[in-house]
């Protein structure tokens, strides 16, 4: 998160989250409809069931790396933006889960991992030369 002195971090454009996260399946569904392709034909070409493809396009199933690569092969769309979009979508959904966010807050409060390390400037003495 970007912070600036005297500015509410929620008001910085790079920190804004969309009201509703976009699932990559929505983008793919628009692309398929724009091209006039049949979901059944596309599913057959990809070697997946129609139900699976339809589930992805209706945001019910994630676009895994494997599915992204299949879409890349049949639609000539780059797989990496789809994978990145899915990761962003998953992060935003997790970040809206109040139970999970509460659990994270409790972990951060009690975790040693998130505490600042303290460094000492004591001279180390080698046991052989002491």
Image (tube, rainbow, N blue to C red):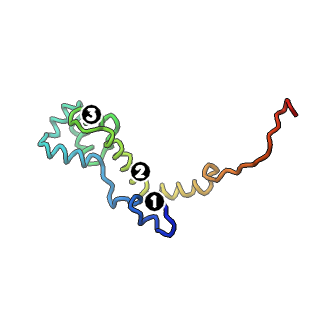
Q: Which residue is mark 3?
A: 70
Q: Report the residue at 76% width, 47% height from top.
A: 121
How far apart, in angstroms, are the residues tagged by discs 3 and 1? 34 Å
Q: How many marks?
A: 3
Task: Evaluate if marks 1 and 2 touch, with contact meaning CB atoms under 8 Å apart.
Answer: no
Quadrant in the picture for residue 20 = bottom left
- In the rendered image, residue 63, in percent from the top left (x then y), is placed at 32, 41
- For residue 125, above or below residue 59: above
Residue at figure coordinates x 13%, y 40% from the top left = 37
Q: Where residue 32 sits: x, y (%)?
A: 17, 43
Residue 75: x and y, percent?
21, 36
What kind of element bears circle 3?
helix
Marks 3 and 1 close (CB-CB < 8 Å): no
Residue bearing mark 1: 98
* Residue toward you, 32 or 60: 32
Question: How much space separates mark 2 and mark 3, taking CA atoms?
Answer: 23 Å
Q: Residues within 10 Å of mark 2 (few under 14, many from 20)?
A: few
Residue underneath mark 2: 91
Tell me the crowding category of disc 3: few under 14, some 14 to 19, or many 20 or more residues within 10 angstroms, Cα based.
some
Q: Nearer the viewer, residue 81 or 100?
A: 81
Helix, strand or loop under label 1: helix
Q: Nearer the viewer, mark 1 or mark 2?
A: 2
Query: Could you tell whether 38 is left or right of 17 in the image?
Result: left
Q: Which mark is residue 69?
A: none
Q: Residue at x 31, y 44 (%)?
A: 61
Q: Secondary structure at mark 2?
A: helix
Quarter of the rendering occupied by the C terminus? top right
| Mark 2 or mark 3, earlier in chain | 3
């Amino acid at each position: 998160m970007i912070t600036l002195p005297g500015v509410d971090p929620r008001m910085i454009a790079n920190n804004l989250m969309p009201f509703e996260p976009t699932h990559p399946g929505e983008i793919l569904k628009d692309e398929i409809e724009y091209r006039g392709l049949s979901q059944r034909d596309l599913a057959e070409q990809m070697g997946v069931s129609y139900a699976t493809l339809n589930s992805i396009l209706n945001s019910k199933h994630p676009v895994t790396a494997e599915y992204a690569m299949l879409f890349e092969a049949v639609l000539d769309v780059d797989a990496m933006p789809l994978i990145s979009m899915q990761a962003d979508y998953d992060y935003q959904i997790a970040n809206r889960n109040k139970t999970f966010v509460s659990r994270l807050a409790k972990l951060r409060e009690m975790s040693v991992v998130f505490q600042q390390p303290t460094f000492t400037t004591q001279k180390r003495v080698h046991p052989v030369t002491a």
